[in-house]
Image (cartoon, rainbow, N blue to C red):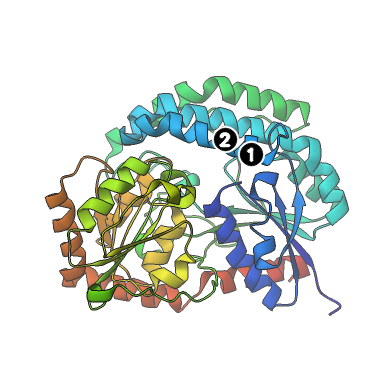
Amino acid sequence: MSDKKTIAFFPEAAFGPALNSVGIAQACEKLGHKAVFLTDPGMAGVYAGYDFDEHMVNMSEPMPPEEMAKYWSDFINGHIPNFNKTPYEQLDTYVKDCWEAIVETAIWAEKDLPGVLAKVKPDVICVDNVILFPAIKRYARENGKAWVRVISCSENEIVDPDIPPHLSGCGENDHACFEKFDARFKQVVKPCHDKFNAFLKDCGEEPYELGEFFEASPFLNLLLYPEPVKFKRRNPLDPARFQYLEGCVREEKPYDIPDFGGYNDKPLVYVSFGSLGSGDVGQLKRLVAALGKMPLRVLMNVGDYKDQYGDLPANVHIESWFPQPSVIKQVDAAIHHGGNNSFNECLYFGKPAIVMPFVWDGHDNATRVQETGHGLHMHRANWTEEELQAAVNRLLTDKDMAAKLAATSAHMQGRHGPTKAAGLLDKLVKGV
């Protein structure tokens, strides 16, 4: 087709943003466009698995895959003790270390990204990250193209004085929490923020205010949060530039529920703490033990650590990976870490969830699930088996929660985020 355009996606090197971008890319190709992915080598193969072209952008010092895997394994294992801390306490540990690493990714990407963009020649670039890559703005400016920011985490990445700060886990009306968290966040990130601003100056870009690492796109910004959990902003976002996708659930291959023998008539619960959280094997084993004593069927995602699990209860089935949307649509309830894909998929399919956050926007999503009546927020470790079992039983029996979830699911499925995103991108690349 003569109006076929190349739409490049550049998500953060993590499965949450990656798989959200896959959903949008699938919808773009249905409109006849060519979707390609720019990716760190650490995520090589993820997008090819969905039949998309991949173009490598080193976002850290190149190293063999086994060394890279060990680096991230060591990083996560070193922070497991911090996972039980409050969001405020994590500022001086996990959050500080993450922002230092994120700034380094932006600096490293500047080495490869200009050449990759020159080779791919995208008509629009969709960036799902929390930091600016100057080469993206420069390419768009020099070639008369647009760039789009995708906010796959909580919508509070786009700040407003009346909503909780990103990563804070504050309740929507707890303004004392807002102020305390924001002040400490700015103190903690100042050294790496100064380094980032010096990098921006070297790239010919204007510096950001303290605490800010990215900006809204002047062209289009896509937020995943659905209407039923949105915050009320003091300064409403301009719909000409900001569009809510009402979730963004990708298409996955079908999943057949395994045989659970004598448990086949019991409720089905899915457990996943994501690729990072699966590294805390001890915590997942606690969940196995507690859920194994209940009249349930349990599917549990254990990531790359499957070989560390011995004999399992007859009602628990583990795998290293699940086609998650195809699983969640079939379950009765879920337990997850608050990652934005899990968060949105449970809402999209109307499934109640216990959210046990450990880092990043999981704290924000966990608070939002509970305060909007779509599920429960529990500490990831400070629970007894009796407390967990009572919470699971509530998910399975709470009629008010079920009614709210049914309404939210109907709302989201009636709008279908990937299709909406593809339509907006189609208009953007065609100049409509």
Spot occupied by residue 379 in the image (x, y as percentages of width and height): 25, 43
Three-letter code for the amino acid on which mark 1 is drawn: Glu
Q: Kindly tell me whether residue 85 is visible in this rendering.
A: yes
Q: Residue at left 61%, top 21%?
A: 194
Which residue is the site of mark 2? 70
Closest to the observer, 43 or 400: 43
User: How far is disc 2 from disc 1 in space, using C-alphas?
Assistant: 6 Å
* Residue kind at label 2, given as amino acid type: Lys
Q: Is residue 209 visible?
A: no
User: Between residues 57 and 3, which one lies in front from this camera angle?
Assistant: 57
- Marks 2,1: beta carbons within 8 A: yes
Say if 142 sits above or below 396 in the image: above
* Residue 393 location (% of width, % of height): 16, 63
Closest to the observer, 162 or 423? 423
Residue 360 vertical placement versus 50 (above, below): above
In this rendered view, identify the residue nearer to me: 403 or 79.
Answer: 79
Image coordinates for residue 176, horizontal then vertical, percent: 28, 33
Query: Residue 66 — which label?
Result: 1
Q: Name the image quarter holding residue 167.
A: top left
Q: Is residue 260 left or right of residue 422?
A: left
Residue 215 x/y as whole percent: 61, 43
